[in-house]
Amino acid sequence: MNCELKFIAHKFSSKYFRPLDYLLKLGTNLKDIWGGKPDFVVAQCPPTFSALPALITNTPYVIDAHNPLFQLQIWQKLPLAQTIINHALAIIVHNGEMFDLVKGLYPGAKLFTIADPIQEIAPVDPPVRIKDQILVIASFDPWDEPVGLLLETMAKLPEYNFVITADINKVTPEIGAKLKALANVKLTGFLATEEYHRVLCSTL
């Protein structure tokens, strides 16, 4: 299949300018679709309006639905959100639970899941356990994670060391300041598979 993967980075780091960011991306995507004339587009949502350029240009599109698209009602209540969802050729969901949820919300939608291939990882033998270390797999995105509860819990358990997979450069300044204030917290950012497996096997 001849395809092109397009990722457009944010122009502004502040979320206060995110609406302007999305507007600039809309223009870029419209230009790319009009120029490239693809047979169809796969749009990663949310935000729901990632698929808006395809709708505007009357280009067939598939929605790659990350869970918050259907777990958070705001993404379904934005202007044109229902039109965008209902006009999709198909919707990709990440697991069986989301399949059932979306099927209940949109009975007429064509849904399917794409299972990631399981990569074989060499076993850590013997695993080296680090005392009182807890791995927290989270991005610390307040949209779909209990960030406040996590921060409160880690602050109340100073006897434990928390290793968090979040990237300090991708959290909000407020959350970043709170994380840096906790002496028992270490942020790793993205980890290669082998390193992730080592950290996972070393925790409680």
Image (spheres, helix red, strand yellow):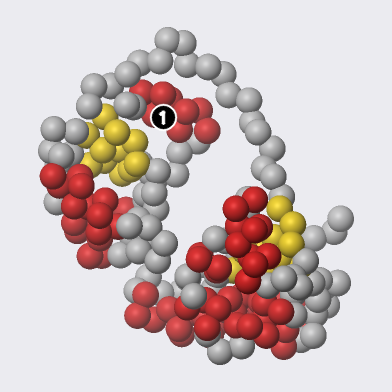
- Examine the image and state in which quarter residue 88 appears: bottom right
Q: Quadrant of the C terminus?
A: top left
Identify whether 12 is placed above or below 176: below
Q: In this view, does 173 lie to the left or right of 76?
A: left
Q: Answer yes or no: is residue 13 visible.
A: yes
Q: Quadrant of the N terminus?
A: bottom right
The residue where tag 1 is placed is: 200
The residue shown at (15%, 39%) is 157
Identify whether 90 is placed above or below 36: above
The residue shown at (15%, 47%) is 155
Disc 1 packing (10 Å; few <14; some 14–19; many ≥20):
some
Q: What element carries label 1?
A: helix
Q: Where is residue 99 in the image (x, y as percent from the top left)?
A: 66, 58
Q: Position of residue 183 (x, y in %)?
A: 14, 42
Q: Position of residue 87 (x, y in %)?
A: 75, 80
Q: In this view, does 122 lie to the left or right of 88?
A: left
The residue shown at (46%, 85%) is 20
Q: Which residue lies furthest to the top in this view?
A: 126
Q: Which amino acid does label 1 sit on?
A: Leu
Q: In this view, does 66 lie to the left or right of 38?
A: left
The residue shown at (45%, 38%) is 191
Q: Position of residue 177 (x, y in %)?
A: 19, 58
Residue nearest the observer in this picture, 105 or 113: 105
Identify whether 12 is placed above or below 197: below
Q: Is residue 25 left or right of residue 176?
A: right
